[in-house]
Amino acid sequence: MALSTSPRRSRYGRTALGGPVQGWLYAAPTALFVVALFVIPLLLVLQMSGSDWPLLRGNTGPNFPENFVDAVNHRLFWDSVQFTVLYTVITTVLLIGLGLGLALLVQESTAWKGFLRTAFLLPSALGLASASLLFYVLYSPIAGPFAGLMESWGITFLGSPEGALWSTVFLIVWRFAGFYMLLLLVGLQGIPEEIYEAARIDGGSRWQIFRDITVPLLRPTFALTTVMCVTGSLLAFDQFYILTKGGPDNSTMTVVQLIYNIAFQGQNSLGIAAALSVIILLALVIINAVQLRAFRRPEEA
């Protein structure tokens, strides 16, 4: 009996593709999306970072070391790095700490569980730019609802460096706390209840159970939330651009906003801005690698 070597056909009469070809066809749209929106822009940024590239004239020749030197020597570079790191530390601690507290609350709550989850998560449905505009009006000393109180007490939410920082931090915590609550709640629900029951039988207190069981088993979730929070905070732009424009006196200038200002305001140099972007990209890769290594279990190290 001769074996057929023709392509296998499906029940509908079409040739059925199998094996690697079918896998490549499924992956092709995503691969094209990544190439078009990540790989090509990244290559263009690398080219810009090594070229003299004014905003309105395009590439005028190679300028490899000078762009990076000018970026690091910019008068606001180190101030923006210092402020961005400070902002990142504050928001990361507050968001993960508050997110964990809210996750524990809505996990153990019974009667109000559904309502609390919805209420805490609701601000996450609002876009960051829209939330920033909303808080910009709330903080306004003229049109805001607290204008009279601010005037009588001499409060300016955005008029001082400290006020601008903490006003923006409050916005971010309000906007993202529910999102991190959801991530941590998923991690909490992934811990088997049998482990908690065994710990209670052994006489473990609530604090001991939290310290010795919940926190260690949440290590992968903590790794995810920390990487996301640190990355998002280091790349902060929208909230500061809308609320403070980097002021007062450049005291809330983030690194990403400095890149924007170098590229489109003042120097109008895409080459220096691209060089600074490459520096930030390398810093993010290193920081995330260190974070992921720090959250590894001892047996995985």
Image (cartoon, rainbow, N blue to C red):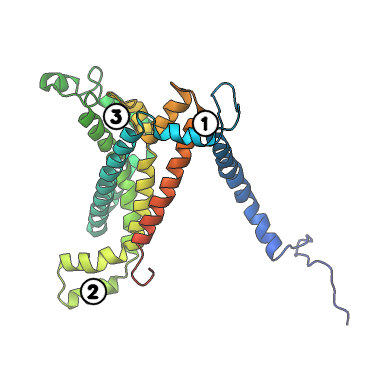
Where residue 151 sits: x, y (%)? 15, 18
* Residue 22, quarter of picture: bottom right
Q: Which residue is mark 2?
A: 197
Check the image and report above or below for 73 versus 193: above
Estimate how packed mark 2 is, as few (under 14), some (14 to 19) or many (20 or more) residues with alpha carbons within 10 Å: few
For mark 1, give the secondary structure. Answer: helix
Residue at image position (61%, 45%) is: 35
Where residue 163 sits: x, y (%)? 21, 30
* Residue 8, quarter of picture: bottom right
Cα–Cα gap, marks 3 and 1: 34 Å
Cα–Cα gap, marks 1 and 2: 60 Å
Cα–Cα gap, marks 2 and 3: 45 Å
- Check disc 3 and give the amino acid type: Phe
Give the left or right position of residue 137, taking residue 236 as reference: left
118 or 228: nearer the viewer? 228
- Check disc 2 and give the amino acid type: Glu
Q: Which residue is mark 3?
A: 135
Q: Is residue 217 visible?
A: yes
Nearest to viewer (mark 1 / mark 2)? 1
For mark 3, give the secondary structure. Answer: helix
Q: Which residue is mark 1?
A: 271
